[in-house]
Amino acid sequence: MAFVITELCRDEKAAVCLDVCPVNCIVLTDTQYVINPDICIDCGACELVCPVEAIYFEDDLPTEYNSATLLALNYFRN
Ligand code: SF4
């Protein structure tokens, strides 16, 4: 389980999550920031600072953002 960044990041990309992540598991793709689910320790720090509330704990992800989980999995595990 991990935190995930939804498409709400795409028009913002504020990057403040990078400053608070203790394990440096957030990276920028062509479209938005994504969280490496294999490294994320579920601290929740990024969720608290995101200015557009783009970040959710995977279990709490609204269904309309389900693609966010796949985006991260495909990016880091392919
Ligand atoms: Fe990093 Fe914590 Fe956010 Fe995971 S939940 S991406 S460890 S800041």
Image (cartoon, grey):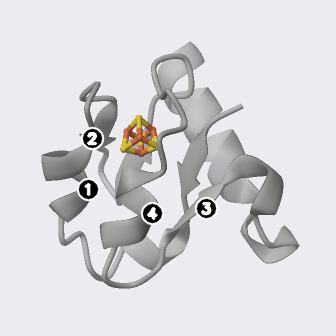
Residue, disc 2: 21
Does the beta carbon at disc 2 come under 8 Å from ligand 1?
A: yes
Q: Secondary structure at mark 1?
A: helix
Quarter in which the N terminus is drawn: top right
Category of crowding for the residue at label 3, using alpha-carbon neighbours closer than 10 angstroms: few (below 14), some (14–19), many (at least 20): many
Which of pointers 1 and 3 lies earlier in the amino acid sequence? 1
Task: Check contact, mark 3 vs mark 4: CB within 8 A.
Answer: yes
Residue, disc 3: 56
| Residue positioned 78% across, 62% down in the render | 60
Cα separation, mark 4 vs mark 2, equals 10 Å
User: What's the residue type where badge 4 is placed?
Assistant: Glu
Where residue 2 appears, as percent x and y from the top left, is: 62, 36
Residue, disc 1: 17
Q: Give the residue at the far left of this rendering.
A: 19
Category of crowding for the residue at label 4, using alpha-carbon neighbours closer than 10 angstroms: few (below 14), some (14–19), many (at least 20): many
Q: Is residue 61 above or below residue 69?
A: below
53 or 7: nearer the viewer: 53
